[in-house]
Amino acid sequence: MHIDACAIYLVNESDGLLHLKAAKGLPEKARHINLQIGQGVTGWVAQHGTSLALSEAMQDPRFVYFPEIEEEKFNSMLSVPIPADCPTLGVINVHSIARRMFSLEETQVLETIAGQVTGCLRNAIQFHQNQMTLKEIQILYDISLAVQSTLKLEHGLWIILSAITMGEAGGFNRAMLFTLGEKNQQLQGIMGLGPDSHEDAVRIWTELDKKKGNLLQWVINEAQRDLHRDSQFHNFVCGLNYSVIPNDNILSETVLQKKPFNITKAREHPLVSQEFADALGVDSFATVPLIAHEEVLGVILVDNRYDQKPITEENLRFLARFTVYASWVIENSRLFSKLLDTNRELLSMKEQLVQAERLSALGEMAAEVAHEIKNPLVSIGGFARRLKDKMADLSQKWGDNEDLKSAANYSDIISGEVERLERLLKNTLIYSKSGAIETEECQLNKLVEEVLYLFKAGLYEKNINLITSLEADLPLLNLDQQKIKQVLINLFYNALESLTLGGLLKVETFQEDYAQKQKMITVRVEDNGGGVPQEVFENIFNPFFTTKHTGTGLGLSICRKIIENHGGTIRVENQLGKGVTVYLHLPLQNSPDYYKN
Amino acid sequence: MKTILVVDDEQNIRFLYKEELEDDGYQVTVASNGEETFKILDKQIPDLIILDIKMPGMDGIEVMRKIKDEKGDIPIILCSAYGQYKQDFRVWASDAYVVKSADLRELKLTIKEIFNRPKVNGPGQNDPSNY
């Protein structure tokens, strides 16, 4: 085949134009040629996917003249598409100075070559994509390492926002982070990262350019400096707070629909208020939810305020990947602090319970001793009184006598001291009864839920499946909330301790009748932890046995005391090999007066 | 002369009650447990029984039930070192409940009050609101 020039045009992915990628026999300046699909002969071939052989190329109506190619030198051209499924990858052109017709064979040869080029190109594109993915993975890996370098929530989040805004990675101009309050359902801005102004943007980007190659170390160092707190943008974000309400604002919608939004015309968007758009100062931005365990933890908002680059789908995909890290950082930190809190709370409650149990065991002993002391005291005091009476009789018989007076005085002292001891014992016994409960009307279900909340992290960690079935609209009960909480904590604690390999914890509340006339409310706590050995079960209500046995005890004796002080009863069913079920029965009516003394 | 039977496992308490009540003009017999009580009751029925609750073997509440079942409605005062039995519904079957003290005035007042009660053979006597 006699030809004088050859050129390969390829479709550029980002602008969709045909770029001249390689040429032979064409002037250097031709390298800058970009054609639209459909423009000129080459564009036509790309558009239609069919070859075109022209002996008088410049005469063809599709011909468009580009001075850079100096096409006036050539007369004939053959243009074949580089085939691909769709769309065309590009076009190969050959030109000849001599006017000639390209034969069918020549066309076929070039088409075959174009086919080969497709293969090469596919490999090259694949290679390029792999390279990109590799780079992306490298960045993600760097960031994840950086995130792991700190336990501080703030540092972790700063690293992630840095990645989102760094040119090499996310490339967004600014990023804002909002967290969702677990209880109040409010989105609170907690961090903003980005330049405060155009000048600032330029300065930061120049600085960042110098850090290339040592991204990881730089990010870690920078995170520890806490400098971001001084930024105006950060403070602006921290002042933002939105309630999560359906159809109200774009941040809420991101939370509720659990999906990203790419907003291009903010001022026309129904979910973006004028005020919000003005505060951001942009017309385009994107939001992504932070999700962990299917729960939305917050929202990240990004924009390109300073270079005004449009946010592409590719950008968003990259962002989505980063938000996974952000979600885990937040979730970990939340779980960690929750774990610390609940552990602390549980420990102190448990400690109180153990303390109470020891006191109660002591109290029982004291009561026993006091009882033994009382009878001799009655004798001592009784006879001292008799002695005094006898002295009085004698002095009547014998008249005044100093010795008799002294003896009467001594017996006075004895009976006075006995009286004192009797009073003391009475007070001690009232105290050691420790039945002092301070009740107020409350919802039992609420108490159960509050205590279960404390165990949330523990249950999750031990892989225990919690099933609750709390009867709605239970009547209010007069309870000592703190004490009933102690009882519940103790029961759940025991269940958890038996469920070392995970399992099931079932908590129910319901109202039922006792002996067909008394109304009561029952709390049922069931576990499938295999039950307790018979000899332990027989002693579960014995404070001495349990405290000696395990060091802390099962705490059930104090639980029983508390429940009995509420006029209720506690019942335990033990099925060896299956589990333990505890029933707390609390009476609905007030206990009769004679119970309270 | 009114007769009183004092049942208590503590010898000195029995002695104290006996001395004090005899000084007040009652005729007093004593028993240290349930078994002795019934031996005495087989021979003679007193006008009043003072029963300690906490005793080895049969406790005072049991003894009382047996007396009421087998010997008829003899007035009974239950005694204990502390007031912990007040909420026990079985105690309500007694005619009075007194917490032991070196000061015997409350016991003596209760005895007088029981002897002065109009003799009624009905459930009203056991009404817990009486004390």
Image (cartoon, coloured by chain):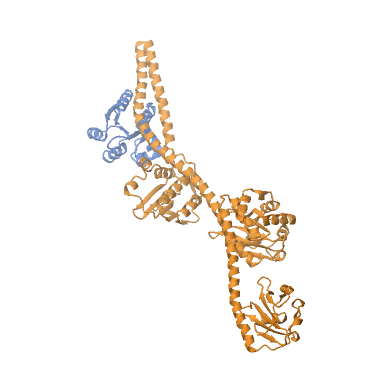
Chain colours: A orange, B blue
- Residue A256 position, x and y percent, is 60, 62
Q: Is residue A285 left or right of residue A447?
A: right
| Nearer to me, A530 or B76 | A530
- Residue A200 position, x and y percent, is 72, 54
| Nearer to me, B92 or A597 | A597
At x 36%, y 21%, the residue is A384
| Nearer to me, A195 or B46 | A195
**Quadrant assignment for the C terminus of chain A:** top left
Answer yes or no: is residue A182 visible.
no
| Nearer to me, B11 or A253 | A253
How many discs appear?
0
**Quadrant assignment for the N terminus of chain A:** bottom right
Tell me the quarter of the picture where residue A245 sits.
bottom right
Q: In this view, does B71 lie to the left or right of A498?
A: left
- Residue A534 position, x and y percent, is 32, 49
- Residue A379 position, x and y percent, is 34, 25
Asked if A390 appears above or below A60 in the picture, the reply is above
Q: Is residue A127 left or right of residue A306?
A: left
Answer yes or no: is residue B28 visible.
yes
Asked if A220 appears above or below A120 in the picture, the reply is above
